[in-house]
């Protein structure tokens, strides 16, 4: 019990010493506003959050998330190939690909795939 207590005291002291050393040797100064602020899409986090935001960046993010989720959903379809018969697997895969193509057509129709405005 005493050994556990001593070990916990040593761990607490060592972690506090390392944090203090990091504070002394770190290059971040308290008065440097840019280094202390998080990077938020190029906006100044110290100003108002209600500034105009380009809808194009939001829609590009949505496109990325849709295709990112698509990859996460394709892997179970590949695993499903060994579990069900070929006809059911083909129907599921065909439905999934058709839904993705409809979404891609909609994005193309809304000119969201034009990267240059």
Image: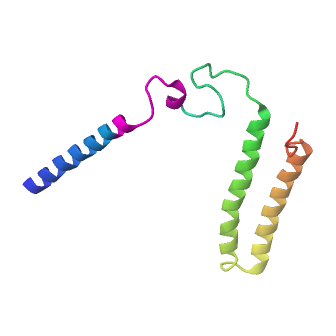
Seen as rendered, the residue at the extreme top is 48
Q: Residue 33 colored magenta?
A: yes
Which residue, as the protein is rendered here, is positioned at the far right? 109
Pick whichever, 55 or 117, lies toward us: 117
The residue positioned 22% from the left and 49% from the top of the image is: 11
The one nearer the camera, 34 or 109, is: 34
Q: Which residues are magenta?
A: 22-37
Q: Is residue 95 positioned above or below 20 on the image?
A: below
> Residue at left 79%, top 77%?
87
Residue 93 is drawn in which quadrant? Answer: bottom right
Q: Is residue 42 left or right of residue 94?
A: left
Q: What residue is at 49 percent from the left and 25 percent from the top?
A: 32
* Residue 1 visible from this viewpoint: no
- Magenta-drawn stretch contains 98: no
Q: Is residue 91 above or below residue 104?
A: below
Between 23 and 103, which is closer to the camera in this rendering? 23
Expressed as whole percent of the image width and height from the top left, the position of residue 76 reads 65, 68
The spot of residue 51 in percent (x, y) is 69, 21
Residue positioned 31% across, 40% down in the render: 21
| Residue 80 coordinates in the image, percent (x, y) | 67, 73
């Amino acid at each position: 019990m005493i050994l556990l207590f001593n070990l916990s005291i040593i761990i607490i002291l060592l972690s506090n010493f390392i944090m203090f050393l990091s504070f002394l040797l770190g290059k971040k100064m308290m008065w440097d506003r840019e280094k202390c602020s998080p990077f938020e899409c190029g906006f100044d986090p110290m100003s108002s959050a209600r500034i105009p935001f380009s809808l194009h960046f939001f829609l590009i993010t949505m496109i990325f998330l849709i295709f990112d989720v698509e990859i996460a959903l394709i892997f179970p379809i590949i695993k499903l190939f060994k579990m069900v018969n070929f006809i059911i697997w083909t129907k599921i895969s065909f439905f999934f690909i058709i839904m993705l193509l409809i979404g891609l057509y909609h994005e193309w129709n809304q000119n969201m795939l034009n990267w240059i405005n």
